[in-house]
Image: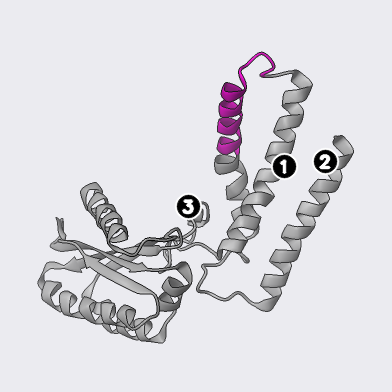
């Protein structure tokens, strides 16, 4: 599996080198894993070609790769496919398209299970909690991810700076070493403690990018986030 992922990453790097020069920071790709019975391999190939054609007719499509399958126990084959788009919006457009959904429904009998990982903002790992759903690891819109991360990061930094100043920690340390240790502490607290709580509290709002939340959920989530930030600023202004 590791070898296949490395090969896919290598292909993506090679592809970026072949494309015209410019800002390629917004390229977005999705890696899809299928578990297919061995006796369905050719039917799956034909079906997957149809699925790729739906991507080819979507704006921003760059390329599709399907790698040689791994032979698994129980007479199953594990296939990996990579679909590349020029930006997350176009990838989401294809994922939510009726054409893709129709082909997907027609092919569900060909594979036992599938899951995929989308690479868009780089923050999705904190929001990949909806196990058992189709879009297991496709995070919410980038602006929601950013607000959520700032909501968790801001109080950590403020409290950490307050504690460091009160206890005179790192005063005798070189600035570079102090900054490294401070960042390690901040990141550990954010990743292991704070972000899981925020994702749990805002689960109704942090839906995958292609799924539209209700207007009420959008308003409540956005207002809660902004108000919480404002209250924290008020509190920390009083402490400082």
Q: What is the crowding at mark 1: few (fewer than 14 residues within 10 Å), some, or many (at least 20)? A: some
Q: In the drawing, does residue 155 fall left or right of residue 173?
A: right
**Image point (51%, 67%), residue name:** 208
**Residue situated in front as seen by the camera: 73 or 144:** 144
Which residue is identified by label 2?
236
Total tally of numbered discs in the picture: 3
Q: Is residue 200 visible?
A: no
- Residue 1 in the image, given as x and y percentages of width and height: 23, 51
Q: Which residues are magenta?
A: 170-189
**Does the magenta-highlighted stretch encompass residue 171?**
yes
Compared with 102, 25 (above or below) is above
Give residue 155's mark.
Answer: 1
How far is mark 1 from mark 2, CA to CA?
9 Å
**Viewed as shown, does residue 168 lie left or right of 88?**
right
Residue 125's tag is 3
Rendered residue at 41%/61% (across/down): 22
Could you give the CA–CA distance between mark 3 and mark 1, rounded to whole angstroms? 21 Å
Q: Which is more N-terminal, label 2 or label 1? A: 1
The front one of 203 and 163 is 163
Report the Cα–Cα distance between label 3 and label 2.
29 Å
The answer to whether residue 163 shows anywhere in this view is yes
Is disc 3 placed on a helix, strand or loop?
helix
Q: Is residue 70 left or right of residue 114?
A: left
Q: Is residue 235 above or below residue 185?
A: below
CB under 8 Å between discs 1 and 2: yes
* Among numbered discs 3 and 1, the one appearing first in the sequence: 3
Measured from the top left, where is residue 230 in percent x and y?
Answer: 81, 53
């Amino acid at each position: 599996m590791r070898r296949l992922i490395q090969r896919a990453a290598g292909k993506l790097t090679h592809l970026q080198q072949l494309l015209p020069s410019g800002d390629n920071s917004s390229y977005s790709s999705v890696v899809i894993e299928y578990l297919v019975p061995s006796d369905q391999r050719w039917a799956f190939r034909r079906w997957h070609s149809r699925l790729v054609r739906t991507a080819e007719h979507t704006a921003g499509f760059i390329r599709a790769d399907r790698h040689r399958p791994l032979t698994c126990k129980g007479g199953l084959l594990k296939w990996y496919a990579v679909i590349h788009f020029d930006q997350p919006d176009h990838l989401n457009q294809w994922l939510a398209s009726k054409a893709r959904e129709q082909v997907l429904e027609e092919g569900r009998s060909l594979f036992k299970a599938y899951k995929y990982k989308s690479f868009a903002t780089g923050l999705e790992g904190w929001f990949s909690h909806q196990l058992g759903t189709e879009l297991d690891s496709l995070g919410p819109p980038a602006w929601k991810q950013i607000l959520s991360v700032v909501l968790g990061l801001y109080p950590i930094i403020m409290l950490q700076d307050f504690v460091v100043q009160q206890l005179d920690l790192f005063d005798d340390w070189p600035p570079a070493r102090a900054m490294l240790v401070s960042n390690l502490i901040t990141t550990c607290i954010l990743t292991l403690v704070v972000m899981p709580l925020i994702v749990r509290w805002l689960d109704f709002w942090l839906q995958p990018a292609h799924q539209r939340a209700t207007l009420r959920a959008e308003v409540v989530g956005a207002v809660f986030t902004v108000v919480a930030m404002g209250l924290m600023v008020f509190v920390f202004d009083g402490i400082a």
